[in-house]
Amino acid sequence: MTEAPNSLLAARDVSKVFPLERGLWSAMSRKMTGRPMRRVRAVDAVSFDVAEGETVGVVGESGCGKSTLAKMLAGLSHANGGDLRLRGVPLAEVMADPKQALKVQMIFQDPQSSLNARMKVVDIIGEAPVVHGLIPRSEKEAYVRDLLSKVGLGPEALNRYPHQFSGGQRQRIGIARALAVKPELLICDESVAALDVSVQAQIINLLMDLRRDLGLTMLFISHDLSVIRHICDRVVVMYLGRVVEIAPTDQLFSSPCHPYTRMLLEGMPRISTERRTFLEVKGEIPSPLDPPPGCHFNPRCQFKTDECLASRPPLDHIAPSRSAACIRWREIG
Amino acid sequence: MKDMQNVPLLEVDGLNTSFNTRAGVVRSVRNVSFEVGRGEVLGIVGESGSGKSVTGLSILRLIDPPGKIVSGAIRFDGEDLIPLSERQMRKVRGARIAMVFQNPMMTLNPVQKIGDQIAEALTEHERLSAQEVRARCIAALEAVGIPSPEERLNAYPHEFSGGMRQRIVIATALVTRPDLIIADEPTTALDVTIQAQIIHQMRQLIDQTGAGLIWISHDLATLSELADRIVVMYAGTVVETGTTAEIIGNPRHPYTRRLLASVPSANEPGQPLRQIPGIMPSLLDIGDGCPFASRCDRRIEGCERPIPAERLSPSRSVWCINMPEEREDA
């Protein structure tokens, strides 16, 4: 994969490994027995690109590493290996400069716990741009008022506290806070997952309007395939720390190439007037602490061969802007 | 699989449940009525604050002060549960009506072996020998698809994955062979592929045992695939009931119709979703009129007064005085 000319974010073989043991005793016992340290590879050599103005979805189930990936991109956690670049500049350098670090902003799942309960809305949204010198303190109130109207809240919200708002309104405040520092990349980590259906529709519409008006680039992380399908241009499917498929959204949903993607799409509940006979999905998601050898998906895969147990399948380029990590994708897709 | 007996398995009739708070009376459930038959899956769908969970808890009389069942009848197999003493009610709970909650870690005791927890549900209600208890526990675990159940009886909850834990909770509910199971968002915290497995198994179990199932969820898609009939709740009251085909294929209450139109899968990818403007009204001292009126574009004079049910077919009722035509925009 070569870097696209308008690439905003480029990830190459990015990994995050967490040690499972800490402290003196386990260090001593390792030294004496020669046993290696136990580790979990939360993100395992992940590569993908996000072009300017594009919305890329990251989808996967618990333990697939999607949230760890988001934290690394937002500078909240450091990669152990691989190369992460924002406009060609290593992300570590970007994050080292407080003003540059503002370029990546995140919207979290739970607006209740991600907003400071003791701060007024005007400070929650306005403090960062003032501190970083984007606007003078005297203009803070007008600036916040303008942002509030962009996310559909009135000026009466200025002097209120987070608990005085509903869940959907709090998520709007979280979005305004992220936009206040003029980010280039917005990371939405399950940002609509905790919202009710009718509120979710309002927030999705808001994000799509803002994307159009402000030309935002978004990385949209979700377990909800119907939301991903609605707002993303391209989708990255992850399973147990690895990318298994990357495809433009319409192609992913019409012709999935990886057996795991197929299983996800089949399990996706659809609104229908008829009772469905659910296919019996086989097997559990293995623990990320002890992933199966070779292709991580092999214990649940109906297409597996001996080769799938032997080595990790490479993420093959199979069509323009499509890749899949399955040695048998030709027979399946 | 419907039993043709005259008495439905469960009949909720004019249920009102309120919570007295310092700020006033929160009328969480207002005048809710529905029936569940044997071998039937009834879905109750609604957003936060719609009263769907309080309805489920009211059926088992698990409403604690300051909450109170104000009026109504809950007829289970023809017998009203509301006048029963707490002692009599304990014989119903777990034995004849079982409940499954969203978070299995809250339901399971982390320091007790799962075999003992399942057995406790059984020995509380039946006198059985140790061998019989063990055999019933193993059969229950087998029924929900837990591999090698004999060995797993001695495991603790933390040794299981989230999906397996929820199966154990379902096994605990099933072990007494209840007539009715109430499941409140049982798969909401689970991954998509695991959710599909559990729904598949629940459907099989209901078809095999002939028990009734009330599946409470905010997720219309899941319900549409599982339920025989659906009750749509909004802000504490039922707005529409009918078979799944009727509700999903031809919603007649403006709220149901707009809710179905607002989900991503009902819209063109990339286009604005047909959202419902506004927010749900506060349940504090809420009136008896249609609770959706403040957000409804079909509001007319009279919506603020109590809305009578309009019975469109034997299976179908809609609480609206200005219903849209059949499939005018759907």
Image: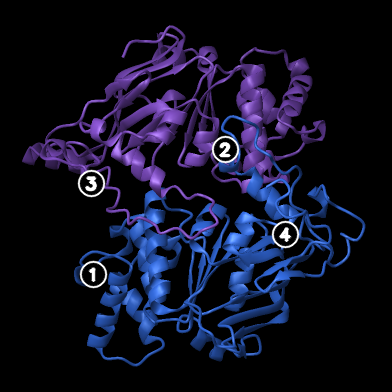
Q: Earlier in the sequence, mark 2 or mark 3?
A: 2
Q: Name the subunit of mark 2.
A: A
Marks 2/4 in contact by CB < 8 Å: the verdict is no
Foreground label between 2 and 3: 3
Q: Is residue B302 left or right of residue B274?
A: right
Residue B330 placement (x, y as % from top left): 67, 47
* Residue linked to disc 1: B149
Marks 1/4 in contact by CB < 8 Å: the verdict is no
* Mark 4 neighbour class, 10 Å CA radius: few under 14, some 14 to 19, many 20 or more: many
Residue reaching furthest to the left: A33
Q: Secondary structure at mark 2?
A: helix
Q: Give the label on residue B235, or none.
A: 4
* Mark 1 neighbour class, 10 Å CA radius: few under 14, some 14 to 19, many 20 or more: some
Same-chain check, marks 2 and 4:
no
Q: Amino acid at mark 1?
A: Pro
Q: How is the image coloured?
A: by chain
Marks 1 and 4 sit apart, C-alpha to C-alpha, by 43 Å
* Residue linked to disc 3: A302
Q: Earlier in the sequence, mark 1 or mark 4?
A: 1
Q: Is residue B211 left or right of residue A142?
A: left
